[in-house]
Image: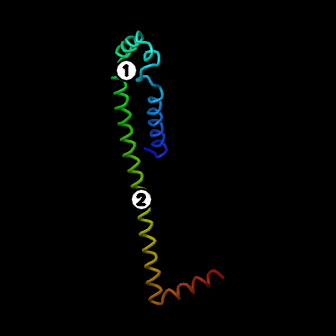
Amino acid sequence: MERKTLFQVVARNNALFIDMVHIGIKDRSDTAWHLSQYESLHEQMRQEFDLEDRFKDIEFKLNLIQQNSKFFLEVLHAQKSNTLEWVIIVLIGFECVLMILDMSGAGAHLLSGLSILNR
Protein backbone atom coordinates (compact mmCIF):
# COMPACT_ATOMS: atom_id res chain seq x y z
CA MET A 1 0.00 0.00 0.00
CA GLU A 2 1.36 3.39 -0.93
CA ARG A 3 2.11 5.92 1.73
CA LYS A 4 -0.32 8.51 0.37
CA THR A 5 -3.13 5.96 0.17
CA LEU A 6 -2.43 4.82 3.72
CA PHE A 7 -2.62 8.36 5.04
CA GLN A 8 -5.91 8.86 3.18
CA VAL A 9 -7.36 5.71 4.77
CA VAL A 10 -6.28 6.90 8.23
CA ALA A 11 -7.81 10.32 7.61
CA ARG A 12 -11.10 8.81 6.38
CA ASN A 13 -11.23 6.48 9.35
CA ASN A 14 -10.72 9.36 11.77
CA ALA A 15 -13.34 11.43 9.96
CA LEU A 16 -15.85 8.57 10.32
CA PHE A 17 -15.14 8.33 14.04
CA ILE A 18 -15.70 12.08 14.41
CA ASP A 19 -18.89 11.95 12.34
CA MET A 20 -20.27 9.16 14.51
CA VAL A 21 -19.68 11.22 17.62
CA HIS A 22 -21.19 14.40 16.15
CA ILE A 23 -24.28 12.76 14.64
CA GLY A 24 -25.59 11.80 18.04
CA ILE A 25 -27.91 9.04 16.82
CA LYS A 26 -26.95 6.93 19.80
CA ASP A 27 -27.86 9.77 22.16
CA ARG A 28 -31.38 10.36 23.28
CA SER A 29 -32.92 13.36 21.53
CA ASP A 30 -33.88 16.48 23.47
CA THR A 31 -37.55 15.88 22.69
CA ALA A 32 -37.44 12.37 24.11
CA TRP A 33 -35.51 13.67 27.08
CA HIS A 34 -38.04 16.38 27.94
CA LEU A 35 -41.29 14.68 26.89
CA SER A 36 -41.72 11.21 28.33
CA GLN A 37 -44.40 10.20 25.78
CA TYR A 38 -41.77 10.37 23.01
CA GLU A 39 -39.18 8.40 24.91
CA SER A 40 -40.94 5.09 24.26
CA LEU A 41 -41.24 5.99 20.55
CA HIS A 42 -37.56 6.79 20.50
CA GLU A 43 -36.66 3.45 22.09
CA GLN A 44 -38.95 1.54 19.71
CA MET A 45 -37.32 3.20 16.72
CA ARG A 46 -33.85 2.40 18.08
CA GLN A 47 -34.86 -1.23 18.41
CA GLU A 48 -36.62 -1.31 15.03
CA PHE A 49 -33.56 0.01 13.20
CA ASP A 50 -31.11 -2.05 15.31
CA LEU A 51 -29.04 1.05 15.99
CA GLU A 52 -27.00 -0.48 18.81
CA ASP A 53 -25.99 -3.53 16.77
CA ARG A 54 -25.25 -1.48 13.68
CA PHE A 55 -23.11 0.98 15.60
CA LYS A 56 -21.24 -1.88 17.28
CA ASP A 57 -20.54 -3.38 13.86
CA ILE A 58 -19.37 -0.03 12.49
CA GLU A 59 -17.17 0.59 15.53
CA PHE A 60 -15.66 -2.88 15.21
CA LYS A 61 -14.85 -2.33 11.54
CA LEU A 62 -13.43 1.13 12.15
CA ASN A 63 -11.28 -0.19 15.00
CA LEU A 64 -10.01 -2.95 12.74
CA ILE A 65 -9.14 -0.42 10.05
CA GLN A 66 -7.47 1.76 12.66
CA GLN A 67 -5.36 -1.12 13.99
CA ASN A 68 -4.32 -2.16 10.47
CA SER A 69 -3.46 1.43 9.59
CA LYS A 70 -1.42 1.77 12.76
CA PHE A 71 0.47 -1.41 11.85
CA PHE A 72 1.25 -0.18 8.32
CA LEU A 73 2.34 3.22 9.64
CA GLU A 74 4.72 1.47 12.04
CA VAL A 75 6.09 -0.60 9.15
CA LEU A 76 6.66 2.58 7.11
CA HIS A 77 8.38 4.18 10.09
CA ALA A 78 10.60 1.12 10.54
CA GLN A 79 11.56 1.20 6.84
CA LYS A 80 12.48 4.87 7.07
CA SER A 81 14.48 4.26 10.24
CA ASN A 82 16.26 1.34 8.58
CA THR A 83 17.21 3.52 5.59
CA LEU A 84 18.53 6.26 7.87
CA GLU A 85 20.56 3.72 9.84
CA TRP A 86 22.20 2.48 6.63
CA VAL A 87 23.01 6.05 5.59
CA ILE A 88 24.67 6.62 8.97
CA ILE A 89 26.64 3.35 8.63
CA VAL A 90 27.87 4.36 5.17
CA LEU A 91 28.88 7.82 6.41
CA ILE A 92 30.76 6.32 9.37
CA GLY A 93 32.49 3.89 7.00
CA PHE A 94 33.46 6.76 4.69
CA GLU A 95 34.82 8.69 7.67
CA CYS A 96 36.85 5.63 8.72
CA VAL A 97 38.33 5.31 5.21
CA LEU A 98 39.28 9.01 5.23
CA MET A 99 40.85 8.61 8.67
CA ILE A 100 42.87 5.56 7.56
CA LEU A 101 44.05 7.38 4.44
CA ASP A 102 45.05 10.38 6.52
CA MET A 103 46.92 8.26 9.08
CA SER A 104 48.75 6.31 6.37
CA GLY A 105 49.93 9.44 4.63
CA ALA A 106 48.19 8.54 1.40
CA GLY A 107 45.43 11.03 2.12
CA ALA A 108 47.67 14.05 1.53
CA HIS A 109 48.82 12.57 -1.77
CA LEU A 110 45.21 11.88 -2.86
CA LEU A 111 44.01 15.34 -1.83
CA SER A 112 46.88 17.04 -3.64
CA GLY A 113 45.89 15.11 -6.77
CA LEU A 114 42.33 16.35 -6.39
CA SER A 115 43.45 19.95 -5.98
CA ILE A 116 45.34 19.70 -9.29
CA LEU A 117 42.13 18.58 -11.00
CA ASN A 118 40.19 21.56 -9.59
CA ARG A 119 42.58 24.16 -11.09
Which residue position is annotated with label 1? Answer: 51
What residue sits 41% from the left and 69% below the top? 89
Q: Nearer the viewer, mark 1 or mark 2?
A: 1
Q: In which quadrant will I find the C terminus?
A: bottom right
In terms of depth relative to the viewer, which is nearer, 31 or 22?
31
Residue shown at 47%/43% (left/top)?
7
Residue under label 2, please give it.
Answer: 81
Q: Is residue 74 above or below residue 112?
A: above
Q: Image quadrant for the N terminus?
A: top left
Q: Which amino acid does label 1 sit on?
A: Leu
Q: Do the residues labelled 1 and 2 touch (CB within 8 Å)?
A: no
- State whether residue 73 is above or below residue 111: above
> CA–CA distance between discs 1 and 2?
44 Å
Q: Which of 63 and 107 is in front in this view?
A: 63
Q: In which quarter of the image is residue 2?
A: top left
Q: Which mark is residue 7?
A: none
